[in-house]
């Protein structure tokens, strides 16, 4: 239930669009290597939310490198103004002053990288002052969850949040999203990115997607089954660990290179022979032979890494479902686009008689619409914490999911609280 504007305290009221009467929020996201602007509208007569526009730009680091805060911040500063203009034109084509429709500006307060966060916060502050609309601060993790709930119509799921900076299993209880399990070191997306650099995969369009493409070669015609390389499987109660697994894989790659190196080419494996002569070609089907049992392709490692990591994530998600008594799972975050992760999770959920709620890259990957979605909830339900004053708009790199009071959901205590 969304209370009428008249029932909100005066300092929490806002201005609906004068032309349509809709509540419209522009969201700005820039916590990592993507800068995005989304515009979201709420129609009070139909009681529905609609994404009007959602453009974004991605900073792609050179091959073998990660994205650094300074260069990423410069990228966001170069593109954010053009993205705001693009979003407004797409949302309100033909209008000379589309910004007059806005009820508020939402931006990512954290968590994320300091330089990129500050760059987008400056843009949000400037637009708020220019257009005389309030600012709404948004927790990046909460934005992923709320965008997923709206996009998939999932009312009360267990949430697996997997991205470059976060790995958490979450369920709602008593006014907050509670973290039941998480990584104790690096995030799953960070593990995938660093693995891709170790084996020489490109960052374009993203390291994780290129790993997925390599892993899909398993069973392809002309390639055959890939070799499964046994990797450390580290689940500690409800938590997971990826740093040791990554170190193990990096060590495997270094040892392989020291023996002459491997490369993937048309499903074949190329390795310099022991006598230093021309490259010998070994078919991928021969990798389990005695002579080649220690050899593997990049595709073998990508396949093995995905199977191992995703099995760990499925295990702690299933444990959370059992503990909370829930029968649905929502996957959010950039890694949530991975079709193999979705398939493995769907198999587990189906065995439990439940349903999987998953999305594609439009809403899994960081985007402006998700910031607008969480922002519009905070605006409509009168969140004192999210309706932020200009002098309080300091970004934070550490902002946990369970720090936010979720005022737009019923404050009920589940049996798992």
Image (cartoon, rainbow, N blue to C red):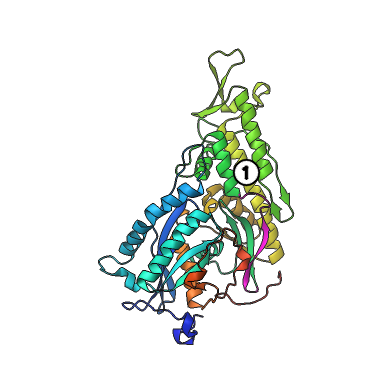
The part of the image, by quadrant, that contains residue 44 is bottom left
Depth check, front residue: 212 or 56 = 56
Which span of residues is magenta-colored?
A: 174-187
User: Tag 1's secondary structure?
Assistant: helix
Q: Dividing the image into 4 quarters, which one contains the C terminus?
A: bottom right
The residue tagged 1 is 307
Taking the view exactly as shown, the residue that stands out farthest to the right is 237
Q: How busy is the neighbourhood of tag 1: few (under 14 within 10 Å), some, or many (20 plus)?
A: some
| Residue 76 locus on image (x, y percent) | 42, 53
Residue 81 visible here: yes
74 part of magenta stretch:
no
| Residue 314 locus on image (x, y percent) | 65, 53
Residue at left offset 57%, top offset 30%: 297
Residue at left offset 60%, top offset 59%: 398
In the picture provided, is 221 more to the left or to the right than 251? left
Residue 365 visible here: no
In the picture provided, is 52 more to the left or to the right than 398? left
């Amino acid at each position: 239930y969304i209370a009428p504007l008249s029932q909100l305290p005066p300092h929490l009221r806002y201005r609906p669009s004068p032309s349509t009467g809709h509540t419209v929020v522009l969201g700005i996201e820039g916590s990592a290597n993507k800068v995005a602007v989304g515009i979201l509208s709420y129609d009070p007569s139909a009681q529905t939310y609609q994404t009007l526009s959602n453009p974004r730009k991605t900073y792609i680091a050179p091959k073998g490198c990660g994205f650094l805060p300074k260069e990423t911040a410069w990228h966001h500063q170069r593109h954010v103004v053009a993205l705001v203009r693009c979003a407004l034109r797409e949302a309100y084509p033909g209008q000379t002053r589309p910004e007059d429709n806005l009820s508020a500006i939402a931006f990512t307060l954290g968590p994320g990288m300091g330089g990129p966060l500050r760059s987008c916060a400056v843009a949000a502050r400037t637009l708020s002052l220019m257009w005389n609309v309030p600012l709404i601060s948004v927790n990046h993790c909460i934005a992923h969850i709320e965008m997923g709930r709206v996009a998939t119509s999932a009312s009360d799921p267990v949430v697996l949040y997997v991205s470059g900076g976060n790995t958490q299993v979450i369920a709602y209880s008593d006014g907050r999203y509670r973290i039941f399990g998480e990584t104790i070191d690096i995030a799953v997306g960070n593990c995938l990115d660093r693995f891709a650099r170790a084996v020489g995969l490109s960052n374009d369009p993203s390291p994780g997607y290129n790993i997925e493409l390599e892993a899909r070669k398993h069973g392809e015609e002309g390639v055959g089954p890939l070799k499964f390389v046994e990797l450390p499987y580290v689940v500690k109660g409800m938590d997971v660990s990826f740093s040791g697994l990554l170190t193990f894989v990096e060590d495997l790659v270094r040892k392989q290179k020291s023996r002459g190196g491997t490369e993937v080419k048309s499903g074949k494996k190329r390795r310099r022979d022991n006598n230093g002569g021309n490259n010998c070609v070994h078919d991928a089907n021969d990798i389990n032979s005695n002579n080649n049992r220690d050899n593997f392709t990049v595709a073998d490692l990508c396949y093995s890494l995905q199977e191992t990591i995703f099995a760990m994530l499925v295990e702690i998600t299933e444990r959370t479902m059992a503990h909370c008594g829930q029968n649905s799972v929502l996957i959010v975050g950039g890694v949530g686009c991975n079709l193999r992760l979705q398939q493995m999770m769907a198999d587990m959920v189906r065995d439990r008689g439940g349903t999987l709620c998953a999305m594609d890259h439009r809403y899994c990957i960081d985007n402006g619409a998700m910031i607008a979605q969480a922002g519009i909830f905070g605006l409509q339900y009168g969140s004192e914490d999210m309706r932020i004053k200009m002098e309080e708009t300091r970004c934070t790199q550490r902002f946990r999911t369970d720090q936010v009071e979720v005022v737009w959901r019923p404050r009920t205590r589940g049996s798992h609280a």
